[in-house]
Image (spheres, rainbow, N blue to C red):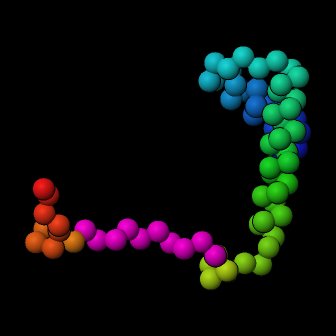
Amino acid sequence: MDEAKIAAYVGSTAAMLGLPLSPARAARVVAHLQRTAAMAALLDTAPLAPHDELAAIYSPAAFPPMDDRPSQL
């Protein structure tokens, strides 16, 4: 996405949300979004497979049956 499209997105989103956005602040937001888009594009080109993910998948432990729970004093 080019700078003009990102600027239009920032302006319309701020207007929709009712956020006051000065031109200077809008320019900073556009710069941050451009940087974020560039980083995302780099990640998209990385040859990664699902098994390359290091983060463990969250799986909550099952609650013990009522009979196995410690008694409340």
Image vertical order of residue 8 relative to residue 23, above or below:
below
Image vertical order of residue 4 relative to residue 58, above or below:
above
Q: Position of residue 51 (x, y in %)?
A: 62, 83
Q: Position of residue 6 (x, y in %)?
A: 81, 38
Q: Residue at x 34, y 71 (%)?
A: 61
Q: Is residue 60 left or right of residue 10?
A: left
Q: How many marks?
A: 0
Q: Residue at x 80, y 49 (%)?
A: 36
Q: Please name whichever residue, 4 or 34, is drawn nearer the observer in this view of the structure.
A: 34
Q: Residue at x 77, y 66 (%)?
A: 44
Q: Is residue 23 left or right of residue 49?
A: right
Q: Is residue 7 magenta?
A: no
Q: Quadrant of residue 5?
A: top right
Quadrant, the C terminus: bottom left
Magenta stretch bounds: 54-63
Q: Position of residue 50 (x, y in %)?
A: 62, 79
- Can residue 40 be seen in the rendering of this structure? yes
Q: Residue at x 62, y 24 (%)?
A: 17
Q: Position of residue 70 (x, y in %)?
A: 17, 67
Q: Quadrant of residue 62?
A: bottom left
Image vertical order of residue 47 relative to residue 73, above or below:
below
Q: Is residue 57 magenta?
A: yes
- Can residue 5 be seen in the rendering of this structure? no
